């Protein structure tokens, strides 16, 4: 192994080799419907099966444009007293992804941390470009913070969490709720391989734009569809105010083209003197949390994220 070659875990290398051997159109050459279906299919093949839980229930809340579909996960049938609630925003570049693509992951998180989790099915671009997704995510977070009867318990605090685009939403929602507080505070935010700063021109984009699952070309496709301005903190939260960022578990992947965007946020949190844990998972790509069957070592990574969450919650 030359000094310049990045470390790749053997099980990750095997999955990348398998993906490279698959004949078929690239995401950018598919129709939207095909791209969305392929994302569901990939997670169906690559991720572990969903956990059986006491509660998996579909709900809705009122959004700025339409009802927002939600899904509640809980390992317990009922809870005594107030509880933090995880508000989960799925990845997919704000273009693909839904409740189905992250169903297995959400069930696993709820089972491992033993807290209720509500997944948010926000509007997608290009049908609903920026800031539609963020407006839906904020509306859902405020609804959960208000302890609606539909949840069945009182919310003592929000844990905002999400992967990729959902990691972007996680940080943006934290900034919006700090500026205009909700009924309860964000007690923890957990952005996982998030896009926080513009990744174009970064060293990680140069190193991993091709052959590491998420490609530079796919990023460009998402970017064009979402159509967010470059100078807008609700699109690139690195531009926002970090002085009152909530306690954070920030997770990046070493082989991710947007890795350096996450690292930039770690620097911003450190410079603002905020309380955070930074985990860079070595030898894995973007989306590793949804590859836990195909890349078995990533189950351990998810368990480390949960352990860091417990640590930050003092649980």
Image (cartoon, grey):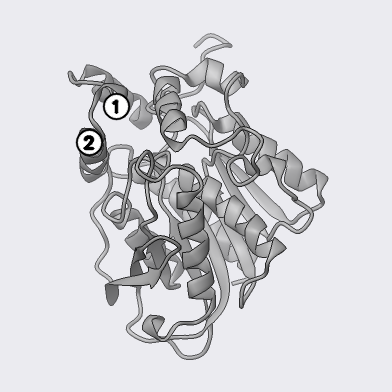
Of 180 and 52, which appears nearest the observer?
180
Residue 287 falls in which quadrant of the image? top left
Q: Say few, some or many: other residues with alpha carbon within 10 Å of mark 1 (under 14 / 14 to 19 / 20 or more).
A: some
> Can residue 285 be seen in the rendering of this structure?
no
Which dot marks residue 162?
A: none
Q: Which residue is under mark 1?
A: 27
Q: Residue at x 62, y 32 (%)?
A: 230
Quadrant where the C terminus lies?
A: bottom right
Residue lying furthest front = 65
Of 197 and 31, which appears nearest the observer?
31
Indicate left or right for 258 with 181 as reference.
Answer: left
* Mark 2 secondary-structure assignment: helix
Of 237 and 84, which appears nearest the observer?
237
Q: Residue at x 42, y 38 (%)?
A: 93
| 12 shown above or below 162 | above
Q: How many marks?
A: 2
Q: Residue at x 75, y 42 (%)?
A: 268
Q: Say few, some or many: other residues with alpha carbon within 10 Å of mark 2 (under 14 / 14 to 19 / 20 or more).
A: some
| Residue 76 coordinates in the image, percent (x, y) | 35, 80
Q: Which residue is under mark 2?
A: 38
| Residue 61 coordinates in the image, percent (x, y) | 39, 71
**Could you give the CA–CA distance between mark 2 and mark 1, rounded to whole angstroms?**
8 Å
> Can residue 162 be seen in the rendering of this structure?
yes
* Mark 1 secondary-structure assignment: helix
Residue lying furthest bottom = 80
Indicate left or right for 237 with 166 as reference.
Answer: right
| Residue 179 coordinates in the image, percent (x, y) | 71, 62
Q: Are marks 2 and 1 in contact (CB under 8 Å)?
A: yes
- Which badge, 2 or 1, comes first in the chain's sequence? 1
| Residue 5 coordinates in the image, percent (x, y) | 51, 13
């Amino acid at each position: 192994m030359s000094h310049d070659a990045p470390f790749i875990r053997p099980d990750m290398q095997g999955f990348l080799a398998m993906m490279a051997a698959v004949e078929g159109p690239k995401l950018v050459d598919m129709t939207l419907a095909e791209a969305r279906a392929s994302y569901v299919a990939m997670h169906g093949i690559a991720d572990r099966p969903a956990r059986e839980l006491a509660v998996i229930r579909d709900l809705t809340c009122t959004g700025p444009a339409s009802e927002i579909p939600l899904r509640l996960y809980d390992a317990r049938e009922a809870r005594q007293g107030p509880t933090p609630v995880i508000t989960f925003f799925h990845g997919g570049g704000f273009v693909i992804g839904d409740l189905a693509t992250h169903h297995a992951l959400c069930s696993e998180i709820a089972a491992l941390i033993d807290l209720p989790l509500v997944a948010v099915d926000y509007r997608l671009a290009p049908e609903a470009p920026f800031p539609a997704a963020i407006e839906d995510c904020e509306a859902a977070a405020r609804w959960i913070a208000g302890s609606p009867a539909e949840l069945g318990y009182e919310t003592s605090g929000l844990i905002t969490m999400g992967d990729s685009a959902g990691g972007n939403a996680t940080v943006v929602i934290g900034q919006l709720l700090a500026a205009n507080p909700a009924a309860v505070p964000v007690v923890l935010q957990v952005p996982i391989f998030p896009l926080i700063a513009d990744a174009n021109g970064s060293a990680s984009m140069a190193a991993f734009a091709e052959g590491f699952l998420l490609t530079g070309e796919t990023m460009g496709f998402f970017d064009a569809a979402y159509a967010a301005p470059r100078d807008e903190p609700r699109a690139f939260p690195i531009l926002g105010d970090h002085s009152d960022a909530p306690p954070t578990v920030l997770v990046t992947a070493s082989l991710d083209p947007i890795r350096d965007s996450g690292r930039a946020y770690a620097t911003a949190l450190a410079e603002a003197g905020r309380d955070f844990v930074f985990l860079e998972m070595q030898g894995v790509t973007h989306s590793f949390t949804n590859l836990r069957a195909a890349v078995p070592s990533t189950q351990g990574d998810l368990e480390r994220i949960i352990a860091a969450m417990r640590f930050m919650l003092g649980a």
